[in-house]
Amino acid sequence: MNYFLGLDLGTGSLKTVLFDVNGKEVAVSEMEYPLYQPENGWSEQDPEDWYQASIETIRNVMKKSGVPAESVKGLGISGQMMGAVMMDQDGKELRRAILWNDGRTSEACEHVREIVGDDLFMKYSLTPARPGLTAAKIQWVKDNEPELYKKVAHIHLPKDYLRYRLTGEYATEVSDASAMQLLDIPNRKWATEILGKMDLTEEMLGKVYESHEITGYILPEVAEASGLTTACAVVGGASDNAAAGVGTGIVSPGRAMTTIGTSGTVFAYSEKPLLDPHKSVYTFCMPIPGAWHYMGSVNSAGGSLKWWRNNFYPEDLEYEAINKDALSSAIGANRLVYLPYLNGEQSPHFNLTCRGSFVGLAAIHTKADMTRAVMEGVTYALKDIMSGIRNTGVEVDHVHMCGGGSKSEFWRQLLADVYDLPVSLPAMKSENSAALGVAILAMVGCGSYDSVVDACNRIIKMRDEIYAPVEANVAAYESVYHEFDALYPKLKDNFKSILSL
């Protein structure tokens, strides 16, 4: 039997999962690495840590599984989006990577807006200049580290840096490149007009592939270190959210996905690269030729709950006490609202200076109330994005849920009630959906299936249980959401002025 690897390069860890050709999970290995925050709002990682984690976890799954190296035919990489890895002409990284949730780029975003113009950004990237996207991070390095930038010969997204280390190839693919703000999204190629304005070249960014296409093969030294062979193909892969979309079967109209990891994402399939008239969500390339998706992200989704756990439930590693306490509090958390903007926010506000807050806090509130408020607040922020997607005219009739947050039965029902939509989970471990998604891309690239849609239809199975919205709960949550929705405009200026104290 043939086997395929899915590498999920996340913010907190890299997870490698080995699947057989039928999508059955065979072995898993995960390795954490540090996050560096040298200044308030900054977020960086050392790319070398990603490479070392990939080697160790691949070696671990090969040892655990006992699968012969020659039976592993392909590998796909799912990666955290919107980052920037600066490399010299020899392929050596010049600084730590600037990550998706880094908050330093507001001024750089305005500078790149002046250089390129929102008309060009809207024409090609289908969104105005955004501080969270890679173009603004590139501009920040140009503006603030000019001597270092003179040495830059290659600029890569996190997963594409890892591809280079594994294969020696400078390349990317359409789903992840969509979030760089440098791609012609309707035509799925580099936007040469934008590159020209920013003094970038296609050679600096690498060749653009479709997500299932083979981009290279494992290098001899990598094969020796990891336990693979040089015949193992590495396909384009996908951004983490697009990979999870494939891994949960979001490959046809009417389907949407919510994933709750460090960040939270709402993702919906689209047959056309349409603009969001309200500019509240992104339109990106789907890892399927001729398809696109709407997407929006909450910067601190599971990150909010992890922050809460680390400070107030440090022994609750499996979140059991947290879920129990949240369930013990009433809908609305006893009139307490949490805004989950710990690291600024992406959709729909695109404001890196806003910050988290509890509003309505009183002496009557308990730790359980505050716990529930955190989980509700994250879910209201996800509803902001779902509302933006629906406002584009996309019809959503069912939501697939994945990521670490999907392990919480309380959160599954909460999501169904707040969205007023049925929620279901993949039959496999939903937290491994992104790894399965890129493994499926590798299966297609290596010829095991005719297409991504064909593979998903044959591999993806959903659990029998469906979390249906409860009518009374829907109405109650809608009232609280109305208050949540009104708070950001009122506090927007305060967030900015507080940071300047």
Image (spheres, rainbow, N blue to C red):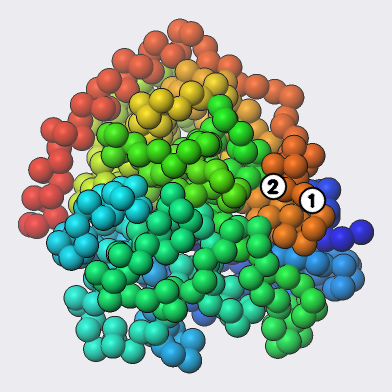
Q: Position of residue 479 (x, y in %)?
A: 31, 15
318 or 58: nearer the viewer = 58
Q: Position of residue 370 (x, y in %)?
A: 36, 33
Quadrant in the rendering for residue 85: bottom left
Name the residue tied to disc 2: 452
Could one spot residue 42 in this view of the protein?
Answer: no
419 or 480: nearer the viewer = 419
Q: Residue at x 40, y 38 (%)?
A: 274
454 is higher (above) or lower (below) than 63:
above
Residue type at tag 1: Tyr
In the rendered structure, the answer to whether residue 299 lies left or right of residue 421 reads: left
Name the residue tied to disc 1: 449
Farthest bottom residue in view: 90
470 or 179: nearer the viewer = 179
Q: Are marks 2 and 1 in contact (CB under 8 Å)?
A: yes
373 or 298: nearer the viewer = 298
Could one spot residue 250 in this view of the protein?
Answer: yes
Q: Residue at x 47, y 18 (%)?
A: 420
